[in-house]
Amino acid sequence: MEELDNLRQIRVKKLKALIKQGIDPYPAESVRTHIASQVLGSFSSLSKGKKKITLAGRLMSKREHGGLIFSDIQDESGRIQILFKKDELKNSDWGIIADLIDVGDFIEATGNLFTTKRGEKTLLVSRFKLLTKTLRQLPEQWYGLTEHETRFRQRYLDLLINVEIKERFIISHKITQAIREFLIKDGFIEVETPALQPLPGGAIAAPFKTHYEALDTDVYLRIAPELYLKRLIVGGFEKVFEFARVFRNEGVSTQHLQEFTMLEFYQAYATYEDLMKLTEKMLGSVIKQVLGTTKVKFGDKVIDFKTPWPRHNFRDLILKETKIDIDKFPKVEDLQKEIKARKITLTYKGKAGRGKLIDELYKELVRPKLVNPMFLIDHPLDLSPLAKKKIDNPEKVQRFQLVVAGMEIVNAFSELNDPIDQANRFKEQVKHKKEGDKEAHLMDSDFVKALEYGMPPTAGWGMGMERLIVLLTNAESIREAVLFPFVKQK
């Protein structure tokens, strides 16, 4: 820390020296004519002309050789070499660049383009202007930036120093935009629903609770936008989607965050079968469009998103991995005994109903072994309180999950639109909550009332955007897919 303080004090002295010379170290204006990528892309034609080029960006290096100073200037599009010559600048300007401008400072540099003897495309600076004087030295100059908590606390430096991190979020932006354009082209309307809700619902998750001072009432940060999006279907919309920020008060893992972006869409007069086809079409085309390939490296595996994707039965996969046939144990007590008899130990220690227990069996013993894209179907009713029952087997629901590399990427189902059935399922969830299941649903009487006014046959779909980005950018943790993940304060 002492070294850091000394380095900062040196820069503060330089700042004062600049001000003493009448130089504004933080001017408001900059006149940039080109960005780095434009210059590099059209270097031949630009270098032939006599018109001067003005670049602006952060100084990333300084290499002094007598009367020459070679530097790299970096903007959002890339970096390019610039050259300061003592005999090309005023004496005062040479003294400023040599003694008072540091790596990390922002400058504006004007001059003509040329190619060095080593073939380096370079801007010969005839004049320059300081845009921002920095008071702290960039990390790579003295200790590097590799420790996770430090990177997340100072994400601005992480993005600046680690180019691959910035590229991940550029890909994230392109994926989001490509999905948005696909859905809009398919007739969907983008909407916004409340983040503060009187009751949490639409997912099996523990909520964050807060207090609405103006109305003197407790409210919850949403765990999903589902119930409000379905209210819109009741209200006459037929295709709606939302990129919703959601909040779940649950544990952190490489696949879980308390705050993340959920893409959900709902389509009237469609079934979960229709949405499986749409999922293949949308994600298959978006991944190919953004990445230029359907093959993605993830860890030590290469995953191919080429469609079509296979379908597998939920019960069959659990039976294969655990030797437990969940259909033979309709009561949670009997299922618990069978798990114990099979000498299976689950890490989950909370109070769980049958659906939660089955879900934990699947998550801990089955899902980690699923690698290539596949649709998981025929989930038990206990696990899906908002999905329609299957006609040929009312103990199962019309639902699918897209699973890749041990992660649930998409969850979708034919929505329940029978208000009496929905009310009964809510009551069952309330019972589980009273028994200690913190993630069970509360009774949402207003949503049941909405269903009583009539919702057409509808299919709904949800995907955590960060999980998709983790997968497509080979990130080691979901926190890497968030610009500013929450970090406990020191």
Image (spheres, rainbow, N blue to C red):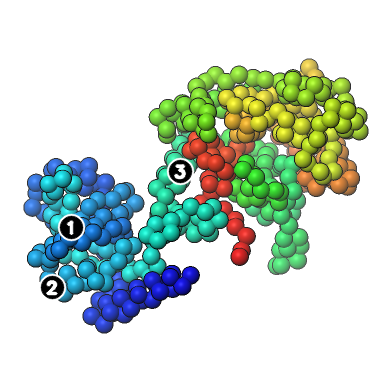
Q: In the displayed structure, does residue 8 sit left or right of residue 436?
A: left
Residue 441: x and y in percent read 79, 44
Judged from the image, the secondary structure of the residue bearing numbered disc 3 is helix
Residue placed under numbered mark 1 in the picture:
83
Q: Residue at x 73, y 63 (%)?
A: 211
Disc 3 to disc 2, C-alpha distance: 44 Å
Q: Is residue 378 visible?
A: no
Q: Earlier in the sequence, mark 3 or mark 1?
A: 1
Residue placed under numbered mark 2 in the picture:
91
Say which amino acid is labelled 3: Arg
The answer to whether mark 1 and mark 2 are in CB contact below 8 A is no
Q: Which mark is residue 168?
A: 3
Q: Which quarter of the figure has residue 322?
A: top right
Residue 239: x and y in percent read 58, 35
Q: Residue at x 52, y 28 (%)?
A: 301
Dot 3 alpha-carbon crowd within 10 angstroms: few under 14, some 14 to 19, many 20 or more: many
Against 475, is 59 above or below? below
